[in-house]
Each structure stands twice: as structure tokens, then as C-alpha cells.
Image (cartoon, rainbow, N blue to C red):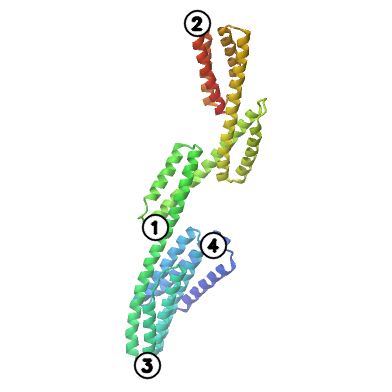
Amino acid sequence: MRKMISSIVLLALVSSMIFSSIPVSVYADSQSDSIIRIASQARDQVKIQLSKVDMTPEIKEKFELGSEQIELLIEAAKNEDDTATKQHFLSAMKIFNDIIQQISERTSASESALSNLPITVDTSRIANELDRLERYVNQLKRIAINNEFGLDSSKCDGLIAQARNDLRDGNSDSAISTIQEIKQSITELNQILKEKTREYATDRAKTLAGKHLEDLDRLIEEAEEMEVSDDTIDRLLEARKNLNSLSDASVEQIINEVKRIMSIKQDFEKSRVDRIESRYQDLESKIDRLSSYSSDIPELDKAKTMYSELRDLVSAGSYNEAIRLLNSLNNLLNEIQNSINDKEEVAAAAEERQISSLSDSKKDRIKIKIQRLELNMNQLEEKVEDNAASKRWLNNAFSLLEDAKNQVDNSPDYALKTIMKIQEIIKRINTMQ
């Protein structure tokens, strides 16, 4: 017995050192396994000792309560809840120490019964039993307070006071009878506390699930904005659907689903970073291409400033802000490109009017337009070399240009319509760059 008590005291001393000398951040990162191991060892030692004595229902309930505190400790450590981890650890250690003290008192009472008078032994035993029961009730109260549970112990408190009065008045039989009522009341308090503990664990799990649901909604929205693969979006949608369906599931089922979602989120985060890097490089190419235009573009300076801010956000890993700025910059660059296209169309119309004043031949004007289109398309072909979609559109434009050449003499109106189609294709290709 002394050896086992010494082990428990040593464990309590270790726990005290851990919580008094190690910073919270270090505890959260590196001490969780040690704390769980200490509490588990204490439970195992108490269990071994209990196997050697007659275990009363009260001691059994107390041992189960301590075991439940260890389970809550493990869950709190998984969720990185430092405050809850500390509370559940200290509660478990206090319960196991009380069990050891109770066993020790019972053993001492049995030994002293051999040498003391019956009336003295009985009174001392009753007083010790009342002290022990009162300590246990106080412990239940502390657990309830630490976890913000509502626990009405007024009945039990009143019975303890009544038993002490009976003992002072010399009415040992009445005190013994009241002790049985106290034990029954404690059993009821234990059941209430167990139920509240289960409700608490379920509520915590559901709160955790709700947080991950909000994260999933945000990730799905980001995935759609960034045009990630359908497979990735489908995985996120399926995860949200599964988590929504667990409203009546057990704590273990909810935690297992949350773990699976965390894995999906990690995969998405990596995919999101790769996608941001890719779009970031595309925008850089767009800015370089727009900078090559000879005409002055005031908005381009603003775009370059936004690009510099975007580069800083990407370097700092601020991807949520980077996504918002990336979309805004992309819209601005598209507006600049459309503005350039409009100016080019106006210039082309002015040039066409000038050509019209020099020649009355409609066919000649169309042929000159075809020549200019062909020159522009040849220049554009070098720019879209690495863009498969743009190359397909440009090949289609070249095919239409050949049709226009063949039709200009026999059907100039048809050739002119074909030229307009080519101009629309070129405008679209410029937007895609």
C-alpha cells in the first residue's frame, strides 16, 4: 500500500511541476502525450490496488468518473484546448488520490478495530466516512464548476449536516442510516454528472463540426472563384454533405469525419497555393504584354502597383487576401485590354475612311484590310505560341482569312462579313492572354 501511495504522490508531484514550470505553448505542443501517460499510469496503479480489496459501489463510481476525466483529457488534447486539458488532468488526479486515501482510511480503520473499544471505533469510523463523503461531494462540485455544469447538491449537503448532528448527539445508528442516504444521493449526483459530461463532449464535437462547416463553405467559394478542378470541388461538397448529416451521430463519428475533412482541407490548401502561383504568373505575362503597346495606358500603372502588392501577399503566404486582390487585378487587366481593342477598332475605322477617299474600289479596300489583318495575325501568332486555346482560335481565323481572299472578287460583301468574324476572334484571343 505504501509503495502504491508513493507512486501516486510522485505522479501528482510530476503533474504539479508540469503545470507550474512549462509555458502554455510548449505544453500544448510537446507535453500532451506526457500528461495523458501520467494520468493513465495513475489510473492503472489505482486499478491494481482496487483488485486487492473489496470495492464498494461508491469507489467503483469514483473510479469510473476518474476514467471519464481521462477520456475528456485525451479529447481536449486532440483539440489543443489547453484550459480543458489542464482541468481534466487535475480532476482525474484528484479523484485517484481520493480513492487511495479512502482505501488507506478503510485499512487503518480495520487495523485499529483490533485494539480500540467498539464504541470508539464506530464513532471514529463514522466520522471518517462522513469526511470522506464530504470531500467526494466537494470534488463533484469542483468538476461541475470547472466545466460550467449545473449541479444541485443541496440534498446531499443537508444529509451530511444531519449525520454530523446525529453523531454529535451520540446517535450513531441514525448517523449510519443517514450515510446510506448520502451514498444514494452521491450515486444520483454521479449519474447527473456523467450525463452532463456526455452532453458536454457531444456539444464540443458539434461546435467543432460547425466550425469546419464554415471553413468548407469558404473553401468551396474560393475553389469556384479560382476555377479549380471539378474533382476538388466535388470532394469539398461531399465532405460538407457528410458533416451536415451527422447531427445525431456519436462524438466518435463526428471526430472521425472532422479528421477526414482536415485531410481534404490540407490537400486543397496545397492545390490552392499552386493555383495562385499559376494565376500570379499569368497576370505577370499580361502586364508585360500590355506594357509593350506604344500608346499611353494610365490604368496600367495602377495594375503594376496592384501586382506588386499581390507579389508581397503571395510571398508572405497571405493567400486569402491574395485571392481577392488577384481577382480584382485580373478584372482591371481585362478592362485595359478591352479599352485597347476599342481604340484599335476606332483607328481601323479611321484608316478605312482614309483608304475610301483614295480609292473608290470596294474590292481594293477589302483587299487592303485583308493584308493588314494577315500582318496582325502573323504578329499575334508569335505571342500565343504557349497558349493552346488561343492557337486553336488563331488557326480558325487564318482559315477564315483564306476564305475571304478567295471570295473578295466574286462576293465582296461576303468577304467583308468574314473579315468581321476574324476581327471578333482576334479580340477574343487578346482577352485570353
- Separation (CA) of disc 2 from disc 1: 80 Å
Crowding near the residue tagged with mark 4, few <14, some 14–19, many ≥20 C-alpha atoms within 10 Å: some
Quadrant of the image occupied by residue 174: bottom left
Q: Which residue is mark 1?
A: 251
**367 relative to 218 in the view: left or right:** right
Q: Mark 4 vs mark 2: which is more N-terminal? A: 4
Q: Position of residue 147 (x, y in %)?
A: 45, 67
- Separation (CA) of disc 3 from disc 4: 52 Å
Whether tag 3 and tag 4 are in contact, CB under 8 A, the answer is no
- The amino acid on which the numbered mark 3 sits, given as a three-letter code, is Asp
Quadrant of the image occupied by residue 237: top left
Rendered image: mark on residue 169 = 3
Viewer-side label of 3, 4 = 3
Q: Which residue is mark 2?
A: 410
Q: Secondary structure at mark 3?
A: loop
For the point 39% across and 66% down, which residue is it?
196
Whether tag 2 and tag 1 are in contact, CB under 8 A, the answer is no
The front one of 94 and 201 is: 201
